[in-house]
Image (cartoon, grey):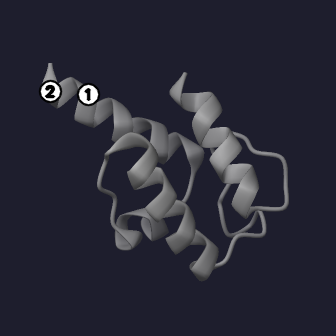
Amino acid sequence: MDSKKIITLWTKYTLLSPSLEVDFFESGGDSLSAINMIVEFQKMFGVEISLENFMRNPSINFLLKTIENVYIKVE
């Protein structure tokens, strides 16, 4: 399941317990860890995401919706 993979990835780069709407940076993430997480996310799911887009909405929910949008377009 994608949400479990994302939560595992998220906790690798933050300090607090994850929730769908929690802000990455308020959870202890910083810009360097955001870049590293995005690179790993892209490798894991094959989905491109820009740092700029992630900075606008730095949440697990955003990452899940990004994956869903790609899968919906493919179908």
User: Quick one: quadrant of the N terminus?
Assistant: top right
Q: Which residue is mark 2?
A: 74
Question: Could you tell whether 15 is left or right of 60 in the image?
Answer: right
Give the residue drawn at x 50%, y 73%.
35
Q: Residue furthest right?
A: 16
| 36 w.r.t. 57: above or below | below
Residue 40: percent from left, percent from top: 50, 57
Q: Is residue 55 above or below residue 11?
A: below
Q: Residue at x 32, y 45 (%)?
A: 46
Quadrant of residue 27 in the image? Answer: bottom right
Report whether 15 appears left or right of 22.
Answer: right
Q: Position of residue 23 (x, y in %)?
A: 65, 59
Position of residue 37 relative to residue 62, above or below, is below
Does 12 sit left or right of 55 as displayed? right
Is there any visible trace of residue 20 in the rendered image? no
Q: Which mark is residue 71?
A: 1
The residue sitting at 71% across, 62% down in the picture is 13
Q: Tell me which corner region of the image, top left, top right, bottom left or bottom right, holds residue 18.
A: top right
The outermost residue toward the front is 43
Q: Residues within 10 Å of mark 2 (few under 14, many from 20)?
A: few
Residue 43 percent location from the top left of the image: 41, 52
Secondary element under disc 1, as helix, strand or loop, is helix
Residue type for callout 1: Tyr
Q: Does residue 33 appear in the picture of this structure? A: yes
Q: Residue at x 69, y 42 (%)?
A: 8
Residue 25, image x and y in percent?
A: 68, 69
Q: Amino acid at mark 2?
A: Val
Quadrant position of residue 71: top left
Q: Are marks 2 and 1 in contact (CB under 8 Å)?
A: yes
Measure how far apart labels 2 and 1 are at the Cα level.
5 Å
